[in-house]
Amino acid sequence: MELDNIAVRCPDCGLKFMTRQVREFVDTGLRNSELRQHIGEVTPCYEPYAICTCPSCGRADWSSAFDAVFEECALFQARTTPHLQYRAAALRAAQKERNYYDSGIFYLHAAWCADDGGAVLQSKEYRRLAIEVFQRSLSDVSCPLDSRIDVEYLIGELLRRIGQFEACRSHFASIIGHLPPNYAVMARKLMRLADLQNSDLVAFDTAA
């Protein structure tokens, strides 16, 4: 993975500072059951470089939310643990912007970064919070129409991942009738894993 130093400006306070960003994002099309990208058995771990925190006002957001500037800056982005940056971004999205869909995506990324860092308890809590705000996003206008299927699917999978197996089965049973074929196949597989009380991550594989 190649990284570049990119100068950006904070949209809140206007501070200019340097960030570390991935030079090129390559989408393999392969996903695990939480829809995180992987390459065979390898997870690229792009997520720590997709989040940015202003070292002045503390705004945490996607790196793309900070406009690039073409100059060198003396300051660097805040060196906060990635999952804590995503947590701050999730809280901001929910509390300040009332965008529960974005908050859920941030919490999901926080869970992945916590997994990568071995923060097991935090990763489980982030998944629980992602479920909560994703459910809320489906009842308001914050979940984009073209993302509703992903969110409905993810709620069921996140329930399984945190060990709420009966809730996982109940959720998938209530939505499987309107899922696209590939998601419906995965839902059935995850329901079988829930029956076995298996919370392990698996590949998003729709083979029968």
Image (spheres, grey):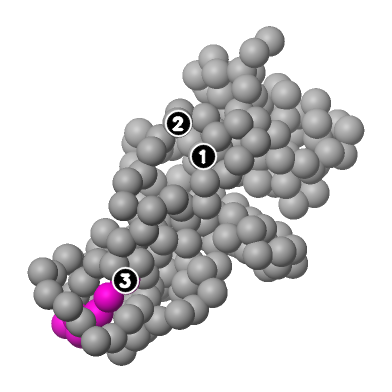
For residue 47, above or below residue 51: above
Task: Tell me the distance, in whole angstroms, between the alpha carbons under discs 3 and 2.
Answer: 25 Å
| Amino acid type assigned to the residue bearing label 2 in the image | Thr
Q: Per the image, is 14 magenta? A: yes
Q: Residues within 10 Å of mark 1 (few under 14, many from 20)?
A: many
Where does residue 40 sit, x and y in percent of width and height?
Answer: 60, 31
Element under label 3? strand
For residue 118, above or below residue 59: above
Task: Tell me the distance, in whole angstroms, between the alpha carbons under discs 3 and 1.
Answer: 23 Å
For residue 82, above or below residue 45: below
- Front residue of 18/148: it is 18
Residue labelled with disc 1: 37
**Given contact means CB atoms under 8 Å apart, are the residues at marks 3 and 2 in contact?**
no
Residue at (42, 69) in percent of width and height: 89
Task: Tell me the distance, in whole angstroms, between the alpha carbons under discs 2 and 1.
Answer: 7 Å
Residue at (71, 64) in percent of width and height: 118
The residue sitting at the top extreme is: 208
Residue labelled with disc 2: 28
Where does residue 125 sit, x and y in percent of width and height?
Answer: 67, 64
| Residue 131 visible from this viewpoint | yes
Element under label 1? loop
Query: How many labels, in total?
Result: 3
For residue 64, above or below residue 43: below
Numbered range of the magenta stretch: 12-19
| Amino acid type assigned to the residue bearing label 3 in the image | Thr
Q: Which mark is residue 19?
A: 3
Where does residue 4 sit, x and y in percent of width and height?
Answer: 30, 61
Q: Which mark is residue 112?
A: none
The residue sitting at the right extreme is: 196
Residue at (41, 61) in percent of width and height: 49
